Image: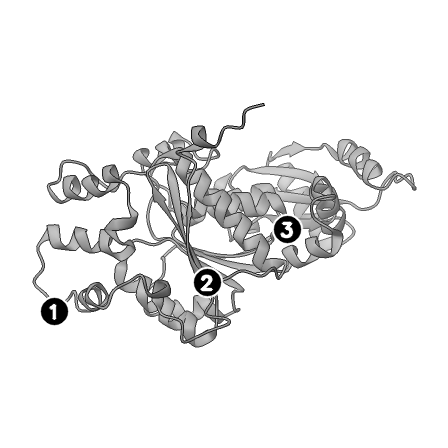
Amino acid sequence: MKKKLLMIKTNINKPLILNLTREKDKKIFKELKKMGVEIVDKYDLLLQELNKCSPKQSIKRIDDVWIYYPWHQKLVHSLSEPYFYLIKTSRNLGLITKSEQKNIKNFRIGIVGLNVGNPLAMALAFQGFTKFKIADNDTFELSNLNRLAAGLKFLDVGENKTILCLRHIYDINPFCEVIPYPEGISEKNLVEFLVKPKVDILVEEIDNLVLKIKIRELAKKYRIPVIMATGNESDVILDIERYDLNPRLKILNGFLNDETRNKILNLDKLNLTEKEKILLIRNFIGSKFLSSRLNKSFMLLSKKMIRGIPQLSEVSFLRAAVLTLVIKQFALRKKIESGRYIIKISNFRETRILI
């Protein structure tokens, strides 16, 4: 059955949207049904919701759209995109206006690095963002289950993170526009990722220090704002770089010192020890901004006493929430200044309000 399904839909990582008013789509729909694809039909429930969103008119039937999800091997009865989006974002109204929601829908986000990028992409898709470019060449590992999005599971171990993220976005909204880079980003495709088509904002969350600098240099050239949220035990360090307003702005707002920057850009020429390379990762942010436990973890990593830089689930989701808020502010053209921001929740007991 798998080979026959692939003949119908060669891109197994994108939903196939079928409008049964078109003869070609109708034939594909019938063929999929013959192959035994599971049918999910909740159309009546969708219509009920649509009528709640449009109380002045009674809608009985408006279109005949079906979504085929190759990775689930399911055909799902749906409303067409405008009605789908209307219902999906209806609970935003009151906090987000209709015109603001339109801005959110048309705002294109580039995300490189899909550890925090995974829960971020889901949060953005939930809020109504629909245009994404995502990149990560890494595979999902069992150890990632300590923090990545709730949709991921043990069965996903070994899968490419970009493909998993892409599927999660489409599971939330099959009408999204997602441009995936499962091979990750490199010096060969950095320009393409940033400007073909151009992203409105770049979320940089990759591990490669050289690319962290080079992608910012290109963001300066193409005047693209860059944001990054770093986990700091249970708190977040947020960096906002408004290269769209000031392309002469220093990388990381000047928090990356010249010595560290030059070492990173000359890694292939320097004979650094493993410990020195690991400390470069710490120094990219700046040890003085990091908690004592996180600073110590870099030393443990250099001695191979732990397998990676520790990250906790609470801060991964907090980072995603902070980035979602900032991206929404950009989409709504709010005033946002370049700089480094410290978001602390670890001291929440100190802010308790007494009656």
Q: Residues within 10 Å of mark 1 (few under 14, many from 20)?
A: few
- Position of residue 286 measured from the top left corner of the image (x, y, whole percent): 26, 54
Helix, strand or loop at mark 2 = loop
Q: Earlier in the sequence, mark 1 or mark 3?
A: 3
In three-dimensional space, the C-alpha distance between marks 1 and 3, rounded to whole angstroms, equals 47 Å
Nearer to us: label 1 or label 3: 1
Residue holding disc 1: 269
Helix, strand or loop at mark 1 = loop
The reply to whether residue 13 is visible in this rendering is: no
- Position of residue 45 measured from the top left corner of the image (x, y, whole percent): 76, 31
Of 280 and 22, nearer the camera is 280
Helix, strand or loop at mark 3 = loop
Tell me the amino acid under the disc marked 3: Phe
In the depicted structure, whether residue 44 falls above or below residue 336: above
Residue holding disc 3: 175
Q: Earlier in the sequence, mark 1 or mark 2?
A: 1
Q: Residues within 10 Å of mark 3 (few under 14, many from 20)?
A: many
Confirm or deny contact between disc 1 and disc 2 (CB under 8 A).
no
Q: Residue 307 — which label?
A: none
Residue displayed at 34% across by 53% down: 137
Residue holding disc 2: 338
Image quarter in which the C terminus is found:
top right
In three-dimensional space, the C-alpha distance between marks 2 and 3, rounded to whole angstroms, equals 33 Å
Residue displayed at 25% across by 64% down: 257
The reply to whether residue 155 is visible in this rendering is: yes
- Position of residue 276 measured from the top left corner of the image (x, y, whole percent): 12, 54
